[in-house]
Amino acid sequence: MTPTTIAGDVDYASHGLGYGRQRRTDPRIEAWVHAALGDARTVLNVGAGAGSYEPLDRHVLAIEPAAAMRAQRPAHLTPAVDGVAERLPLDDQSFDAAMALVTVHQWPDVARGLAELRRVTRGPIVLLTFDGDALDRWWMADYAPEMLAVERRRFPRIASLVDGLGGACEVHAIPIPNDCVDGFSEAFYARPEAFLDPAVRRSQSAWSFVPDDAKARFVHRLGADLASGVWERRHGAWRAKPTFEGSLRGIVSRPPR
């Protein structure tokens, strides 16, 4: 297949190193994804990244435009094909199910990408994304409003995704466990110290759009407040929350019976 132009707003050759280590499959989220796929035997994974959440007991075709992400796929997964959501090199109705997990915000033409998913899929289509209207439900709104503003601009509205999938969808708020191993930002709601680690921030693409001075202020303030006990006094109750219903959303489109 001829290599494609890399889609999306992040240069993963520069900012994607470490995703395979930091953005691992969380078993609780995985259980939801695999249940949403139903009994599909063939699954298309679009915007597959380093392969998180791909089922091992089914035939999976992974599509991923970023070479840096394809290179981080573990050896037990099949290699990903270089391609983009808007131009899937597949026949109509060729897969039992499709998944697109935390990727739609990277698609230059979301409507076209969703139309392609519908074209090549005869069964359920499963999306994981974040609801921009719910991003400020946690303490990060006090510390890094610049980062949340970036996220709010990038993520398509849930209603537009539902419309793009044909309108008849289930939308689920996915609880985030306090020991979540998939290192998106809300995964660390109970572990604020993690954000002092540059490797953690590098695996959260929104930080690549935050100005360096704003990132430096965030790291300095959070570090100082953790050291002094200010964060604990103001936000320490977050450590005791077993789960957080934040902005993580699962959308499932099922064909009419």
Image (tube, rainbow, N blue to C red):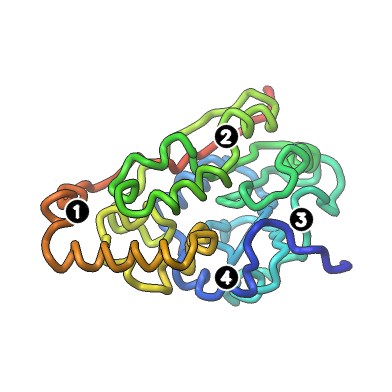
Query: Gap between marks 3 and 2, in whole Å?
Result: 21 Å
User: Can residue 59 be seen in the rendering of this structure?
Assistant: no
**Residue 141 appears in the figure:** yes
Percent position (x, y) of residue 242?
23, 48
For the residue marked with disc 2, what is the amino acid?
A: Arg
Residue 108 location in percent, x, y? 73, 49
Mark 4–mark 2 distance (CA, rounded to whole Å): 25 Å
Q: Answer with mark 3 or mark 2, whichever residue precedes in sequence.
A: 3
Q: What is the distance, in whole Å, between disc 2 and disc 1 at their CAs?
A: 29 Å
Which amino acid does the dot numbered 3 rest on?
Answer: Val
Q: Quadrant of the N terminus?
A: bottom right
Secondary element at image label 1: helix
SS at mark 3?
loop
Q: What residue type is labelled 4?
A: Gly
Q: Position of residue 81 (x, y in %)?
A: 76, 65
Q: In this view, does 53 lie above or below 2?
A: above
* Residue topped by disc 4: 16
Report the residue marked by disc 3. 84
Q: Mark 1 points at which residue?
A: 239
User: Residue under circle 2?
Assistant: 157
Q: Which residue is drawn at 81% across and 51% down?
A: 88
Label 3 to label 1, Cα distance in Å?
39 Å
